[in-house]
Image (tube, grey):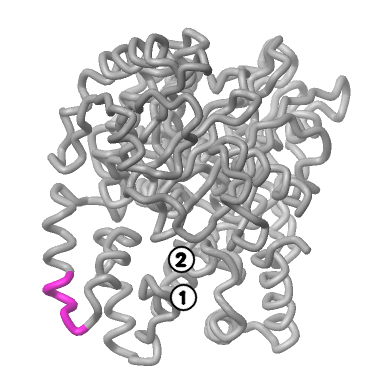
Amino acid sequence: MNRFIEHPGNKTYDIIVIGGGISGAAVAYEAASQGYSVALVEKGDFGAGTSSATSKLIHGGLRYLANFEYGLVRESLRERKTLENIAPNFVYPLAFLVPLYSHIKMRSKLILEPGMIIYDLLSYDKGFTWDKSKRLPWHRLLSTEKAVEMEPVVKMDTLTGAIVFYDCADFNPERLTLAFIKSAVKYGADVANYAKVEDFVRDGKRINGVVVRDLLSNNTHTLRGKLIINCGGPWADILLNIARGNEAPQHIRRSEGIHIITKKITNANAAVGGLTPTGRPCNLIPWRGHTLIGTTDREYIGDPDKYCVTREKIEEYIAEVNASFGNPNLLHYSDVLYAYGGLRPLVEDQTKDVYKTSRKYEIFDHEQDGLAGMLTVEGGKYTTSRNLAENVLKTVGRKFGRKAKSVTAKQHLTGCEIRDMEMFIKQAKLTYSEFPEHTIDYLARMYGTELPKVMSLAQKDKQYAAPLNADGEMSAQVVYAIREEMACTLMDILIRRTGIGTLGHPGDEVISSVAQIAAKELGWSKTKMEQEIESTAKTLLLPA
């Protein structure tokens, strides 16, 4: 992939997508695959915002049943299966153990069992996966004794048993987002990260382009487009205000979600669903030999560019987690290896509590309010992004006088062209038998059918093959991220192209090693390299 913004030319695009998170990536892919000429610009790195601040799940949204949002749940469950099909190296079945209690109404068998029956019925087609290993079982009930045996961490007070059901884990949301970007590029889309929209080009009351600053070169370019699609997520209202000249400012509602990663604190290879004192889910999720805990859900007021995770917020969440599982000593701040957070854009409604606010999405055509040539997508959830994009293109098709015909649910994403994941990993281990099996197992999931390109780098130059962490990640990935995947910063490499930094600070030696390779590949000066190391270490270390 190349940053087209460095040499943009004078092309007029059918569609310019603003935002390179999962929504923008899916819209760009959907549009390009339907024959539109597409440009996508992202002011940071691809998937660096909300899309990287997930619980690493692809799920139907069991809790939305309580709000009677059956349509949203069915859409999510259908898209869960679709993502299992088109991205088999990223999406895997995951068991959830949900404890039942006599003193909690929403966790009683009388309430939850009928809900699980509905959840299973709404996912009636979950057995129709391309890869048989992706098929999800139906839910089952456990006795109190079996529940405690399976997972001793559950809160014991008034425990009456448990329900085990299945959703899916997302092995690496950042790379799954990147797979959508790559799929758009495969169909001819021009994409660029670190390309910030600073203004809009207007012809009377019609928007017909954007003014973009290349944040790496500081050069400004004008891109022309017949239709602008605002997929700015938590920044969507800011873009709208720029388009409107800041008249009658619009504000979207934002919800903050924090996750923490600790050593493995669960017994089984299943997620465990706790419940906070305020009634929100608190999940302990197995991930890469550790436990991922999430998430908070509280309204965020302020500039989204100034959002950060603080020690106070982490400690507040630890207290909630401990209360959820009835153990005040389950977690301490010293147990946290890494913490991350992000902002979710929500569709505005009358719900006071953002946790209860719908995760529906809406597509706004601004022609009626004086901004012809511009659409905005708000709300939504990671799982339903592909279907969101399909619906966006139905609106686009009406504007262009074309019939929308989607193919994205019927073909693998780029790098994910695998029909049998278990056989694929088995064959990869045989092909690269000189490497540890656990390394190949991990990298096969990260890179899918692009694995040979990464391994070729490691085989040609042994200095790129030395393991950098327990998963066996290696310097070859760093080179590949820069040469082939548009990584521009140390954080791009450590967090969004590899998993080297996603379990917390990997150590000064590893960061220095990666930075030296990046400096050589990207032509950084010594000063620039030191700045990258300093800012990266600050981000990966827990707040003091």
Determine which quarter of the picture holds residue 44.
bottom right
Looking at the image, residue 415 lies above or below residue 480: above
| Pointers 2 and 1 in contact (C-beta within 8 Å) | yes
Question: Three-letter amino acid code at disc 1?
Answer: Val
* Left or right: 236 as drawn, with respect to 73: right
Determine crowd level at label 2: few under 14, some 14-19, many 20+ residues with C-alpha closer than 10 A: many
| Quadrant in which the C terminus appears | bottom right
**Residue at 87%, 20% in the rendered image:** 248
Looking at the image, residue 33 lies above or below residue 348: below
Q: Position of residue 252 (x, y in %)?
A: 73, 25
| Quadrant in which the N terminus appears | bottom left
What is the CA distance from the residue labelled 2 to the residue labelled 1? 8 Å
Mark 2 / mark 1, whichever is N-terminal = 1
Residue matched to label 2: 498
* Left or right: 284 as drawn, with respect to 323: left
Q: Position of residue 270 (x, y in %)?
A: 34, 44
**Residue at 57%, 18% in the rendered image:** 358
**Residue at 29%, 44% in the rendered image:** 92
Residue 164 in sight from this viewpoint? yes
Question: Which label belongs to residue 355?
Answer: none
Magenta-tinted stretch: 429-434
Looking at the image, residue 493 lies above or below residue 303: below
**Residue at 50%, 18% in the rendered image:** 399
Residue matched to label 1: 478
Q: Position of residue 486 (x, y in %)?
A: 51, 64
Q: Which of the pair 339/316 is nearer the observer?
A: 316
